[in-house]
Amino acid sequence: MKSNVYFMDFRSRRKKENKRNKIMRLFDAVETSSVISKGDLTAVKLHFGESGGDGFIRPIFVRPIVDKIKEAGGNPFLTDTNTLYSGSRKNSVDHLNTAYEHGFTPHVAGAPIIIADGLKSGSFETMELGLKHFSIARIASDIVNADAMVVVSHFKGHEMAGFGGSIKNIAMGCAPAIGKRDQHSTRPKVDDDKCIGCKACVNVCPEGAIKMHDGKAFIHEGSCIGCGECLTVCPVQAIELDQWGSEARDFIEKMTEYAYAAVKGKKGKTIYFNFLMDITPDCDCVPWSDAPIVPDIGILASTDPVAIDKASLDLVNSEPALRHSMLHDRTCGESECECANDHFKAMRKGTYGELQISYGEEIGLGSSDYELIKL
């Protein structure tokens, strides 16, 4: 049976068609009343953005979602978890200050913020899994204890996952630091021939795992936590995942298993929104926002995380690359290349984002078979 994915594009010629009203129409389409019950403490899982970046979903787009949760009788709160890497969201105090800096205040967004894994990422529950990579998973306590959840994701590229949508949002985003470490199995390597000795990776590594030897960067595997920060800052792409892709594939599968754990206790109690706008090459975790790779497309809603990510991926891949973007620079133009119909692989050939879809379906997270319903 196909999963319904509801879609609205960004064309508007009158007040009735503004983005706020479109978001509310999408919310109604997914039959909210069957998901959110009166009194449900409802987590609105989103990404508040890293200080310096601006690709995150604007709080004015979160407000209509919050209002519709209240209309359904739910009691919403905005939430995310602290980061594994260094940055402006490493602990709850810095995280809250970053969220406020980006406009996520109760006055604007309509709900309070609760950082779900506590002050220093030590608040979590253990979930039984019994899957290929994990027998257990650690999920932030306030995500587990929420009665319902609305997952609001900015669909974009990612240096390790290929792309990030609903699946990645609930996998990394619902895990405390120890759970994020569980998922980050990859250990990058430095290509000495490409390395220019700029020390950008040395300066960004949160564990001090990267040192300089003979003018080249070297990653000490025993100290590396696999956070991928070095991948994002290297100006010449001298840092890569293993060439055979085994670690990269394991990372995707581990991440998808964590997504399964995050919603395991919320069957029928989770709604997903993907915003296909400002589709940048990188995760919102980086402290900058590169130029969008394709034109803005629209907003999707579903109760199936696999279906909504598959629909989002298909819509992005159907769009032309924008000039002066990373995608335009990296596209090889060869029709027989494996990246020809995959924009995210065109930018980062060592990633396997499509595994989020196929493995998610395999473990029962959702279905890749969807019907796109344009409202």
Image: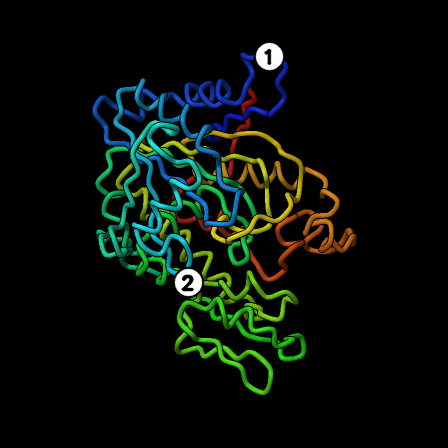
Residue 147, picture quadrant: top left
Can residue 234 be seen here?
yes
Amino acid under disc 1? Arg
Is 370 or 14 nearer to us in this picture?
Answer: 14
Q: Which residue is mark 2?
A: 184
Mark 1–mark 2 distance (CA, rounded to whole Å): 46 Å
Q: How far across and how far down the image is residue 151, in percent?
A: 39, 36
Counting from the top left corner in percent of width and height, residue 309 is at 51, 40
Give the residue type that dot 2 points to. Answer: His
In the image, residue 144 lies at what x, y percent? 24, 43
**Residue identifier under label 1:** 14
Residue 358 visible in the shown view: no
Q: Is residue 91 above or below residue 200?
A: above
Cβ atoms under marks 1 and 2 closer than 8 Å? no
Q: Quadrant of the rendered structure where residue 122 is?
A: bottom left
**Residue drawn where x is 29% and y is 55% of the image:** 137
- Residue toward you, 283 or 235: 235
Residue 132 picture quarter = bottom left
* Residue placed most toward the observer, 151 or 134: 151
Horizontally, residue 261 falls left or right of residue 122, namely right
